[in-house]
Image (cartoon, rainbow, N blue to C red):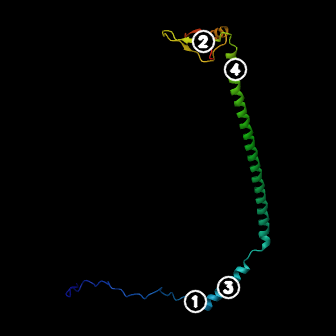
Amino acid sequence: MIDPTDKQTAALPLEQPKRGRGRPSTGAAMTPAEKQRAYRQRLAEQKNNQVPEAKFGKVRSTAAERIEQLEQQLADAITRAELAEARADVMGNELAIIKAKLGKASATIVNIKTSNVTENKTLWDVESQVPGKHTWQKVAGYPWPNQEAAEEFARKMPNETHLRYRVVQVKAPK
């Protein structure tokens, strides 16, 4: 509320006039005829500013040549990849064959060692013992077909840890 006796305080302009609906006019609106004239003028300018085909023809031919080069390089790379894949397949097959042959050779060695046993089917093992212990452990390897070969193997074993070695007789599997 405003005090009617107060003459020093100015009234606040709280209420403003209401605007009309819609977009306010700028005063620079064009008539439809002026719009059509401007449109035709823009079309004429575009037609005059077009670049002749001769300028783009050279660029297009250069781009087409480059595309052909890249396509050829891609085809060559694909061919090299296919050849490398074929070589890898061949090498994998060769590896599988060699592994199979190695397995057969290993089985043949075991068969030879066990088949060269004398009539009483006796094999020989090499065992080792750590000083101070009472147990003997088999040294890794296959059983030996004769005692001399097993003793030769035991003599060639390194004796850095002061292990003791012995050759023991084992019955061959039937």
**At x 69% / y 20%, what residue is drawn?**
109
Q: Earlier in the sequence, mark 3 or mark 2?
A: 3
Q: Between residue 165 and residue 111, name the one nearer to us.
A: 111
Where's residue 156, x and y in %? 64, 11
Disc 1 designates what residue? 30
Q: CA distance from mark 2 to mark 4?
A: 18 Å
Q: Residues within 10 Å of mark 2 (few under 14, many from 20)?
A: some
Residue 123: give its label.
none
| Element on which disc 1 rests | loop
Query: Which quarter of the rendered picture does the N terminus lie within?
Result: bottom left
Where's residue 33, x and y in %? 62, 91
Three-letter code for the amino acid on which mark 2 is drawn: Val
Q: Earlier in the sequence, mark 2 or mark 1?
A: 1
Q: Between residue 72 and residue 136, name the one nearer to us.
A: 136
Q: CA distance from mark 2 to mark 1?
A: 117 Å
Q: Is residue 11 left or right of residue 85?
A: left
Q: CA distance from mark 3 to mark 1?
A: 15 Å
Query: Which quarter of the rendered picture does the C terminus lie within?
Result: top right
Q: Earlier in the sequence, mark 3 or mark 1?
A: 1
Residue most extreme to the left: 5
| Element on which disc 4 rests | helix
Residue 109: give its label.
4
**At x 71% / y 24%, what residue is drawn?**
105
Q: CA distance from mark 3 to mark 2?
A: 113 Å
| Element on which disc 2 rests | strand
Q: Earlier in the sequence, mark 2 or mark 4?
A: 4
